[in-house]
Image (cartoon, helix red, strand yellow):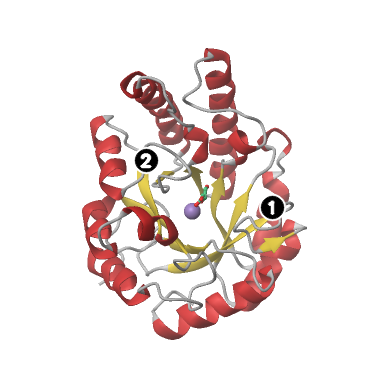
Amino acid sequence: MSGNCPGALADGSGMRLAVTAAENAAPLAPILLRGDLAAAADAAGKIGYRGIEIHVPDIWSFDAGGLAAACSASGVRVSALVSGQLNVRLGLSLSDDDPGIVERALEGLGLFVEAAAALKSGVVIGWVRGRIGDRDGRAVLARQAEAIRRIDVKAGDCGVPLYIEAINRYEIDSLNTAAEAVNFIRENGLKNSYVHLDTFHMNIDEYSFAKAIRQCGPLLGYVHVAENTRHYPGHDRLDFQEVFAGLERIGYGGFVTVECLPLPDGMEAARRAFEYLSRRFVFQT
Ligand code: LER
Ligand code: MN
């Protein structure tokens, strides 16, 4: 079964494979295609990927128009724009005690939404949510929720899906599981937000892949795949049969993006991941 998942960029004809890309990234960041984004789009298309996911270092100077032209020349879509660098590079977060920092994070996310609208893409909201730490969890989560409600409204105005990534407990201290992300979206009445699952994080915090995917159902909007070690799919022992059976069962029709360690190097990991996944599971070609 495929195609009944309203998860945002689904077009009714099944899952599509995408791969991570960035102009610059830390050596072991899980980003495979590095350097010029037009060259990355070209390389992704030549391997067989249907999409690239862009990790944007500075949304204030990001050239969405240039990327759109490069993607259309290479026949790939932008599966999502990832907002994590707002936090990692600029120290912005939706949980900060300083309202000015929350507003600046929202300004950045607003630009992400506008760029995603131009690219017919979505926006990943992960680390920019920020950490609770030793503060009052309820108050900080309420602040986070209020900020995400605001960006969710803007996303609706622009026709852009937001992907709320469930990230493992060692990286962030809220929304670590599918169930928590689903509840967050429902309790806050978010109309343009979907759950984003990542098999690397699921392997740490979920009871089972199948159960987590089932809990999301039509709210699943985006998926990252990597091994239990975060190497490329096929390198280790993660049960991708269970993952893809679960995705098929709920009719997931969005992007499945390879986000793994760039080892032995990014291009080779992108090739091996594509070969492993496309031989075993059915994707749009
Ligand atoms: C972080 O570990 C992760 O999985 C990225 O997708 C964060 O945006
Ligand atoms: Mn991820």
Q: Is residue 127 above or below residue 13?
A: above
> Camera-side residue: 5 or 93?
93
Q: Which residue is mark 2?
A: 193
Q: Which residue is mark 1?
A: 67
- Disc 2 crowd rating (10 Å Cα; few below 14, some 14-19, many 20+) is many
Q: Amino acid at mark 1?
A: Leu
State if disc 1 and disc 2 touch (CB < 8 Å). Answer: no
Which mark's residue is nearer the viewer, 2 or 1? 2
Query: Which amino acid type is marked by label 2?
Result: Ser
Task: Say what secondary structure mark 2 lies in.
Answer: strand
* Residue 161 locus on image (x, y percent): 43, 44
Q: CA distance from mark 2 to mark 1?
A: 24 Å
Q: 262 left or right of 4?
A: right
- Given residues 106 and 202, the one toward you in this image is 202
Residue, x 64% and y 64% (percent of image)? 32
Residue at position x 33%, y 77% from top? 241
- Asked if disc 1 is less than 8 Å from ligand 1, the answer is no
Q: Position of residue 14 (x, y in %)?
A: 37, 69
Q: Quadrant of the N terminus?
A: bottom left
The residue at label 2 has a CB less than 8 Å from ligand 1 = no
User: Under tag 1, what secondary structure?
Assistant: helix
- Name the spot of residue 27 as percent of width and height, x first: 71, 57
Q: Is residue 37 left or right of residue 282?
A: right
- Does residue 251 appear in the picture of this structure? no
